[in-house]
Amino acid sequence: MLGIFTSALGWQPWKMRLTSPDEKINLTLDLYEESIKVPGLEDFGPMNGYMDGNIYGVWYVVGFDIKDDRNATITIANDLGSEDQKLSLTQNADSTWQLKFLGYNAVKRAQGKKLVKIPSELKMKKDK
């Protein structure tokens, strides 16, 4: 099924690194194969991707559903495996990406001595 999203030129819209400059959060993806080494989880072998940056810990991809070349639903889990989070990722007309945390937002960041939720929507762009 994933073959419909690749062309003779090898175009793969779901293999990329996105960043939210405002929140300093990164999302690295390869939804075609498990090819990405997740920092701190290298012993588990390559995975489909991860989220890191200005968040508590590293969240890795545990599942996904590609709708088309502009929309996907991704499930991530924290590095402890104790929580998971469903995300919606959509490409906007201006070549940016909209990341929405679906349901309860479990992803947090350390602020002082507390863990606080990050925004439930992030505008992201491809990292060059």
Image (tube, helix red, strand yellow):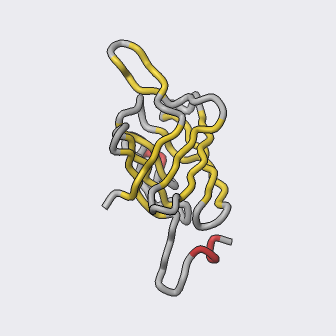
Q: Residue furthest front?
A: 94
* Residue at image point 49% right, 25% down: 117
Quadrant of residue 24 within the rendered picture? top left
Q: Which quarter of the figure is the C terminus placed in?
A: bottom left
x and y percentages locating residue 25 in the rendered image: 38, 41
Pick whichever, 37 or 6, lies toward us. 6
Pick whichever, 20 or 9, lies toward us. 20
Residue 93 vs 11, above or below: the answer is above
Label count reads 0
x and y percentages locating residue 114 in the rendered image: 40, 14
Q: Which quarter of the figure is the N terminus placed in?
A: bottom right
* Residue at image point 43% right, 37% down: 58
x and y percentages locating residue 79 in the rendered image: 48, 35
Q: Residue furthest top?
A: 113
Q: Is residue 21 left or right of residue 66?
A: left
x and y percentages locating residue 42 in the rendered image: 40, 47
* Residue at image point 41% right, 29% down: 56
Residue 99 vs 102, above or below: the answer is below
* Residue at image point 48% right, 80% down: 10
Q: Is residue 31 left or right of residue 38?
A: right
Residue 83 vs 114, above or below: the answer is below
Q: Is residue 79 left or right of residue 63?
A: left
Quadrant of residue 53 within the rendered picture? top left
